[in-house]
Image (cartoon, rainbow, N blue to C red):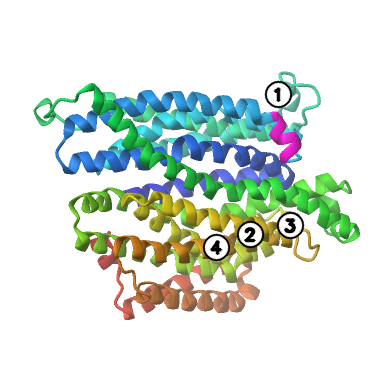
Amino acid sequence: MLLVSALVTKIIGAVFKLPLTNLLGGSGMGYFSCAYGLFLPVYALSITGLTTAVAKLTAERSALEDYAGVRRILRLSLYCFTLIGLLGTGAILLLAKPFCRYVAENPDAYLSVLVLAPAILLGCISAVFRGYYEGLRTMYPTALSQLAEALAKLLCGLGLCRYALTHPAVVLRYLPDGTTPLAAASAAAVLGVTLSCAAGTLFLVLRHVCVGDGISPDMRRGKFSPGDDRALYHALFAVLVPVAAGSLITNLTNLIDLATGMHCLHAAIARAPGAFADRFAGNAGQDPAALANFIFGSFSGLAVTIFNLVPSMTNMFGKGAIPAIAAAHARQDRKAMQQDSAAAMLATGFLAFPAGMGIAVLAQPILQLLYPHRSGEILAAAPALGWLAPGVIFLALTFPLFSMLQAAGHARTALRIMLIGVCCKLAGNLLLIPLPQINIAGAAASTSLCYLVTFLLSLYAYRKKTGVRLGVMLFAKPAYGGMLCAAGAALSYSLLLGRLGNTLALPAAICTGGCIYLFAMWLMGIRLSTLREHT
């Protein structure tokens, strides 16, 4: 259910992000990405770990048939994390201006950051309900609320952005002096994201009030003393703090790109100003700051958008495995942990390998198909997307490993591993981006290196901590099939391009590669019916 929801949500998200990028271009997406650069770390601290923590505790109490404790977890979580959401919103409001001016070196993004602040509070409330129902193994609330958010973002975000671009005089009348039409349009698009969070939260609250969780009064056995509240808070934060910190470090890769990317791009442009001006003058003029914002916006708006599609869908396998592995761990059922872990990793690899390898060989055609009128942005983003392609695979495989480590009570291990990966990311950015011949592609290469390191360390740690063995052959078959898929897609694209053009040749090549992959997996004994049974 989560996978289907994620797939539909990502399709809707692509329908939102693709025209949005075409509307705003590289410079406008620079403002949009700056807002997310500050938003995501705060979001991770207050929200991302919360869903995992609530789901884990709820699954454990439910496995023990302690339904009074299940209800108590929901109430205490709502009280506590509404307060945390208010603090997160306040942090965004306070840090917006100094962050945009002194860290991101992009002061025009200030309005985009401000309008995103209320999403922290709304996200905290929705995260509690999602974790609660996921812990009860009811995935419909999470799935349907994600769909509600995606639809609201599509309608509100694109509608408001288009209105701001077509009626700049009306919009700028209510904004501070000096605001540019492009910065106003970016803020309007971000406001659509905030409204989408409100739609998802409203859906979850109404569903809980009208439908409920299925726990009857007869099922709630046992009384809780005042001391039990403290014990529940302690257990909740024992999971939340390391998970949220690990998620924060994961999102710090985006913040590192924002903090170092613009600064290092300035250094690269200063070393070879003529080369950059010749390539991008028609899009960003001769101003070095505008050039850096344009290149960074092209990278974050085009390449990173495609990079995030596959891991965000395969992440559902890890989320779906959390209740099962947490319950098996509570029962000390090693066989169930082995089966559930292997199923989650196999399903993830089944999607990740062909997608990542296909992106590697078809990076520029994909961008040309999705952004046909943005040749300057494609020129900046295509090399970076090629370097990001290996990271698609490693990040997708790392997500379920982190979820399983967290479900087995080893969240701090995931935190330490991600910290090592972030150090690799920071070093790679500082060394590679200032080189004019590499520039923003250095951020992509360091991202792939970061997630390669985290995947290998996570695989080793999960085996050492839990005794669950995830053999090499689990990944060998999807990897081999992915190579055949990529080779078939690249060959068919080169043969069809001259006859059909990019618009028809690329979908035909993708379909050809997909058929080759499914046939190869069938020959190796991995079938879709088998995957459905395991997952």
Disc 2 residue type?
Leu
In the picture, residue 277 is in which quadrant? Answer: bottom right
Q: CA distance from mark 1 to mark 3?
A: 29 Å
Q: Earlier in the sequence, mark 4 or mark 1?
A: 1
Residue density around tag 3, few if under 14, some if 14–19, many if 20 or more, within 10 Å: some
Residue density around tag 2, few if under 14, some if 14–19, many if 20 or more, within 10 Å: many
Q: Residue furthest top?
A: 174
Using the image, determine if residue 382 lies above or below residue 6: below
Q: CA distance from mark 2 to mark 1?
A: 31 Å
Q: Position of residue 242 (x, y in %)?
A: 43, 44
Q: Earlier in the sequence, mark 2 or mark 4?
A: 2
Disc 4 residue type?
Gly
Residue at which label 2 appears: 367
Residue at which label 1 appears: 171
Q: Nearer the observer, disc 4 or disc 1?
A: 4
Residue at which label 3 appears: 375
Q: Position of residue 36 (x, y in %)?
A: 60, 40
Q: Earlier in the sequence, mark 2 or mark 1?
A: 1
For the magenta stretch, what is the residue range? 97-103
Check disc 1 and report its element: helix, strand or loop: helix
Q: Earlier in the sequence, mark 2 or mark 3?
A: 2
Q: CA distance from mark 2 to mark 3?
A: 9 Å
> Which residue is at 45% across, 23% downward?
83
Q: CA distance from mark 4 to mark 1?
A: 40 Å
Residue at which label 4 appears: 391
Between residues 401 and 314, which one lies in front from this camera angle? 401
